[in-house]
Amino acid sequence: MNSLVVAALLLLLLALSYQVGLSRSRAVAGGSTLKMHSRPNYHGLMVALWCLVPALAILLIWFFVGDDVVRSYTLSLLPAEVVNGDPTQLRDALRRVEQISTGFGVVGDAQPYENAAGQALHEFRLLTFWAMVAVAAGVGIIGLVAMRARIAPRLRARNEFETIVKVLLAICSGIAILTTVGIIASLLREALRFFSFISPADFFFGTVWAPRFAATASGDYGQYGLLPLLWGTIMVSAIAMLVAIPLGLMSAIYLAEYAPRKVRAFAKPMIEILAGIPSVIYGFFALVTLGPALSALGAMIGVPIRATSALTAGIAMGIMIIPFVSSLSDDIITQVPRAMRDGSLGMGATKSETIKRVVLPAALPGIVGAFLLAVSKAFGETMIVVLAAGNAPILRFNPFEATSTVTVSIVNQLTGDTNFASPQSLVAFALGLTLFGMTLCLNVIALYVVRKYREQYE
Amino acid sequence: MSVSAMSSPAASAGSPNRSRIQASLRRRRNAEKRFRFYGIASVTVAIGFVLFLFSTILHEGLPAFWQPVVKVDVTFDPAIIKVDPKPVADTDQSPAALRRANLDWQRKVTMVNWNRIIENSIRAEAPDVEMSARDVQFLVSQNERYRLRDMFVENPDLLGKTVPIELLASANVDVWLKGDIDRSLASDRQQLPEAARMLADRFYEDGRIRMAFSSVLFTNTDSRNAPAEAGLLGAFIGSLYMMIIVIVLAVPVGVASAIYLEEFAPKNKLTDLIEVNINNLAAVPSIVFGLLGAAVFINYFHLPLSAPMAGGLVLSLMTLPTVIIATRASLRAVPPSLRQAALGLGASRTQTVFHHVLPVTYPGILTATIIGVAQAIGETAPLLLIGMNAFVTTLPVTPLDQSTALPVQIFLWEGNENRNYFEPKTAAAIIVLLSVMLALNAIAIVLRSRFERRA
């Protein structure tokens, strides 16, 4: 109900202030809007802004400090020996008072001081809420009146409004920067806390991954060697690339250079469907269909292949990345200037010779960039490997065996119900930092290369 | 050099040069054919993967939309339901007393041995078969007794009456009848006891068990003790909340920053940095956003674990770069003549953008939104890190309640130990998720064509 009241208040202020601005502007204009600098609706918008922004500011301040105010008021209601006594008892008392004040009732008999405090708290809540609403409305009205008084023919209301809009737009584009800062800050902070338990050398160069979920605080946290996970990541990604690069690149070449228009119009979106399928579905496919099929194939040719292995996960991931490689390469191949092809064909080269000796070398930087982006995508892929790689963080080189990756370990170490105090969950951030670092390097190089390439032919 | 050789065919006819050229030409033409074949093969294989993926999922998942139900005559036997008649309001009774009496009565009704009633009704269908109480419990889904109880609470007049009811068969019966388990396995390795297997087969043959459309899949939440009744509604609502949060947060902010960067921002170091930053952000692995969510939204701002609110915020941040990049692309595609015309007639920069440029880009922004939202609702990994893989049986009423999401539910069912039963069910959930995404895309196409017609 409280939020409804607040919403109603804001809507009311909005409608009122806009109307006031509009009618004042018309009154000032006195029938001829020609002498006004700005049109009436800009006056209305400015009045609305002057009214709503202060009111919203008051509400926001209350949103952040309100709980603290209520808490200190509740503390003042309790007897001194409870406030200064045992903290758990105090928390208990606070909760009981809270429950009495909301009319929820408590288990057992309430102390008289609890009842009194609950009653007082209830009244205090109501009072502060309505006081806050009144203050917000009052401040809004003051803003409204102040702005209304400013309305005059010479007032450049439109320019003022447009400046505000521009500032708002700029703030929005700052959110993207803020996200990056947030990612780096939170990863670094928690990773540093992890490195206060485990030395970075043991983490980055350790060859054994065996985190111990020590229920007892024995001080033995287990071993956190990154190398087995890193190797697993690289192995699975390499298999994925072996699938995705030839298929993706050849599809792109065919669709860009050979395919008749109708075939291209059909095949390109078909292949891109693969990119729209959520990765958890590839995981299901790998686990249910691909893994058993590979395992049976292995039995047929006499190679033991596990159903959940680096190979299974790698192939499924490769299929997922095909459209990524093919559409990026396609973009780049079609950007190679027509004249280069014509020159080669005019010299008597066949189409495939032109592609291999002229188009591809010209497009090579861009295509390498596309491959790097694909590798970075493979590094960061999670659900396929969680489901289909078998989760065996052991340093071994056989792709037919189960393996584990950085992303799998992040998911295993940090699944929801965690306290961020033990190295067992903090290690997820150290792994995340490693992953972020690796993909960032790849992305920066790739984006730089692709961008340079684009400029070359623009 | 080959040109000169070819230009005088008569002179060099029959010479070794000519046959060398012909051999080389043949080789080159073959290479051309091979190359073209690789291309066609790649495209075919890629499209083949699409078809194979979809046919696998449809083949696995479609049967799971039908579930066996047992049609029996249930007798509300007064010998088992030994409760007083439902309390009615007396004139001298306070409402509180009536409510208490009612609650007392309902508690007594709950204590009734409803399993026994189900057991008796099954026995009546096959009087000649020797079966234990356990055999019957294996046949009918665990939670059907609560349905009988609720029917009785709703309508106490049922006492002593016999009504035909379709009870949901258990998950194990489902597996047995659909052949998802090897029927030739030894009896001690089967999930169902022998009598129950026989009964299931017999009832299926004489039509007392039939395959009914599995509406529980759409009306129930997840369930562990009665897998036959596990449904997707909770996960669907969780996904819906997150979708709304993404649309409300990521789209306006993304469009606003795209407008700023494309139309207003001066070209300097700072905007360059923002540009590079956005491109990088688009390529950051999704699981890193999950770590961000766990550290910032859960640990710092103390949003509740497993809540669609936290999930929606994480997904919004993840979708933001997609929306920005696509919106910028469509703003860039607006011809400069449009801007020049507006500016030439005296419109301000802001008026030009909001009144003239932006409306032209609505179809593009809409497509970007749909792509971003579809990507967001299929995302699993970041949600795992903020606890959305919790087992939740209640429907989330607000975005701050515990919930799960469709892809996470798929992940959870995929990991269920009862794989014979949950594999088809997972595939069915996948079909639902893909249908949602397909519907989104269809909406986008329809809206787009409408916008374009008007423009």
Image: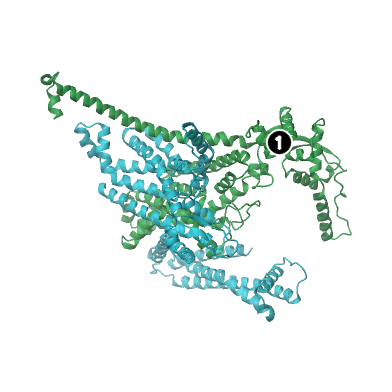
**Percent position of residue B427, x then y:** 57, 39
| Residue, far left | B11
Determine whether B17 is above or below A286 in the image. Answer: above
Q: Residue at x 41, y 41 (%)?
A: A323
Q: Residue at x 55, y 41 (%)?
A: B430
Give the residue type at disc 1. Val
Q: How many marks?
A: 1
| Residue B368 seen in the figure | yes
**Quadrant where the image shows the N terminus of chain A:** bottom right
| Residue B449 seen in the figure | no
For disc 1, the chain is: B
**Percent position of residue A124, x then y:** 66, 74
Left or right? Give the position of B98 relative to B171: right
**Percent position of residue B47, x then y:** 43, 34
Left or right? Give the position of B428 relative to A100: left
* SS for dot 1: strand
Front residue of A158/A317: it is A317
Q: Which chain is green?
A: B
Front residue of A183/A12: it is A183
Query: Mark 1 Cα within 10 Å, few/some/many (few <14, many 20+)?
Result: many
Name which quarter of the figure residue A46 lies in: bottom left
Determine whether A187 is above or below A243 in the image. Answer: below
**Percent position of residue B433, x then y:** 55, 43
Left or right? Give the position of A331 relative to B234: left
Q: Disc 1 designates what residue?
A: B69
What color scheme is it?
A: by chain
Q: Which chain is cyan?
A: A
Left or right? Give the position of A23 relative to B135: left
Front residue of B327/B181: it is B181
